[in-house]
Amino acid sequence: MLSEISIANLYFPPLLIYLGVSALVYKLIERLTRRWLDGTWHPALARFFVSLIVVSAIVVNC
């Protein structure tokens, strides 16, 4: 896991960075799989699980 990151003497927690990166990755995945996600039984739940998988993958790999 990352430790705190300092930018201009402001400390940012790693979770904030993970969430920012995961939001960008999620938007890319959502744009690529929009038709598939809209065709699922519960589109909002499918989108939630995609975002959960993205955040988990980033946390595990860092």
Image (cartoon, rainbow, N blue to C red):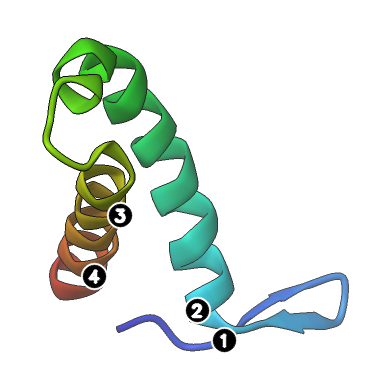
Residue 62: mark in rendering: 4
Please name which of the two marks, 3 or 4, marks the residue nearer to the observer.
3
Contact (Cβ within 8 Å) of mark 1 with mark 2: yes
User: Residue 33 occupies which quadrant of the picture?
Assistant: top left
Disc nearer the start of the sequence (1/2) = 1
Instruction: Give x and y (percent) for residue 46.
Output: 20, 45
* Circle nearer the N terminus (2, 4): 2
Confirm or deny contact between disc 1 and disc 4 (CB under 8 A): no
Which quadrant of the figure has residue 60? bottom left
Callout 3: helix, strand or loop?
helix
Q: Position of residue 54 (x, y in %)?
A: 24, 53
Mark before the other along the chain sequence, 1 or 3: 1
Disc 1 crowd, CA 10 A, few/some/many (<14, 14-19, 20+) = some
Badge 4 amino acid: Cys
Mark 3 highlights which residue? 48
Mark 2 and mark 4: Cα distance apart in space? 10 Å
